[in-house]
Amino acid sequence: MKFQRLKRLALRRLSPCQSVTEAGITFERLSNGDGRFTINIMVDRVRVHRVVGLESDGVTREQAERLIERLRTEAREQRLKLPKGRKVALSFEQAAEYYLSRMAEIHGKNLKNKHQHLSRHLIPFFGGIPLSKITSFDLKRYAKLRQAHITSGTINRELATLSHVLHRAVEWGWLDKAVKVPRLQEDGGRMVYLTQEQIQRVLDAARRDSCWEIYPFIMVGLHSGMRLSEILSIRWEHIDLERLLIHIPKAKAGPRDQPITTELADYLRELRATSSADIWLFPAERSATGHRTAIEKPFRRVIEAAGLNPKEVNRHALRHTAITHLVQSGVDLPTVQRISGHKTLAMVARYSHQNSLHLREAMDRLQRTITQELHRPNENASAS
């Protein structure tokens, strides 16, 4: 379909509470700045009105178009409504599209990540394979292929998305039985972080890089410990430079106010004075969200320029670095949890094992305290 009103530039210009409708698709700009896609069409003389999803979850106009086409195709061919005992030979790609549409309707969790796992990796690999023909051998081939590029932990998260698709397929009657999805052995939770000398090398390389966003991205990561998606979706209106806080309305563990350092606040103040962007810290005109959603390529380039291994130092290393240095500097774990936004103290405690230096210093302090007590003069003995 060709659209005149539902174009990305027009959608970004909508003010809160404004909406635009075309070809059965409505986009509404919500009061919080997010966008919501809905459809309202007639299918076989039945009015169908559904919420497709939120812009912040990665939902686009194209997904709304696909949902409309799917509904009309199902109406024509009566897909998924065959007599008991007969199953539709859905390909993995078809099943994945149906899965995303249905999960958007019920506001499923982590939809943005699942959409990325499916569109970037799972669909390109399993695409045309019938859902019922996916075997354990196929899953092992996929894991082996991905291990050449990413960690076992990341592969496990992608496999978890695949597993959820298969189990939903059984629940919705598309499949009789789902193949068991394996999990890879992870490295025990080892998290790479940067030393002070490495931090300086990375910042120097970022200043020289052609991508202007990479330096402020690294600065925010190191001076706050925020997650990738949280950094890239920062709005200028959510930065409070006086109180040294950045409000995160859609953090993983719920909305929170993220503390930042004075150095970062000073840098952001200078950046604001020269930035022409009014809404996003990292704007992107071609993005459906209006802001950058990925920064992997320039980050890898900077890490290589700093003389480090990009396979070990990924974009999560900034968060690991900030939290690890907080723990090693003696900050108590509840305070670290408040800064990092982790759900539990157990998740924060992992960072206390990254380097034994701060533990050695703690034991030295204990030794000095005990030694002082042993050598303190006995007041009763002196009095006698």
Image: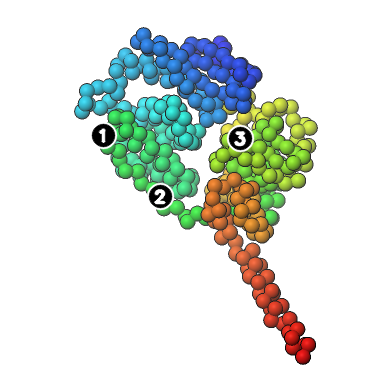
Camera-side residue: 94 or 325?
325
Mark 3 sits on what residue?
Answer: 249
Indicate which label's residue lies in the foreground, 2 or 1. Answer: 1
Q: Secondary structure at mark 2?
A: loop
Q: CA distance from mark 2 to mark 3?
A: 33 Å
Q: Quadrant of the C terminus?
A: bottom right
Decide which of tag 2 and tag 3 comes sooner along the chain. Answer: 2
Q: Position of residue 231 (x, y in %)?
A: 63, 38
Mark 1 sits on what residue?
Answer: 176
Drawn side of residue 129 relative to residue 240, left or right: left
Dot 2 crowding, Cα within 10 Å, few <14, some 14–19, many 20+: some
Q: Position of residue 368 (x, y in %)?
A: 69, 74
Q: Position of residue 162 (x, y in %)?
A: 39, 38
* Residue at the far top in the pictured view: 45
Q: Secondary structure at mark 1?
A: loop
Residue at image point 68% right, 39% down: 246
Mark 2 sits on what residue?
Answer: 184
Decide which of tag 1 and tag 3 comes sooner along the chain. Answer: 1
Residue type pointed to by label 3: Pro
Q: Is residue 25 visible?
A: yes
Residue type pointed to by label 2: Leu
Residue type pointed to by label 1: Asp
Q: CA distance from mark 2 to mark 1?
A: 26 Å
Q: Check if mark 2's residue and mark 1's residue have beta carbons within 8 Å.
A: no
Indicate which label's residue lies in the foreground, 1 or 3. Answer: 3
Camera-side residue: 370 or 167?
370
Quadrant of residue 140 within the rendered picture: top left
Q: Is residue 11 above or below residue 175?
A: above
Residue at image point 62% right, 43% down: 226
Q: Is residue 7 visible?
A: no
Q: CA distance from mark 1 to mark 3?
A: 41 Å
Q: Check if mark 1's residue and mark 3's residue have beta carbons within 8 Å.
A: no
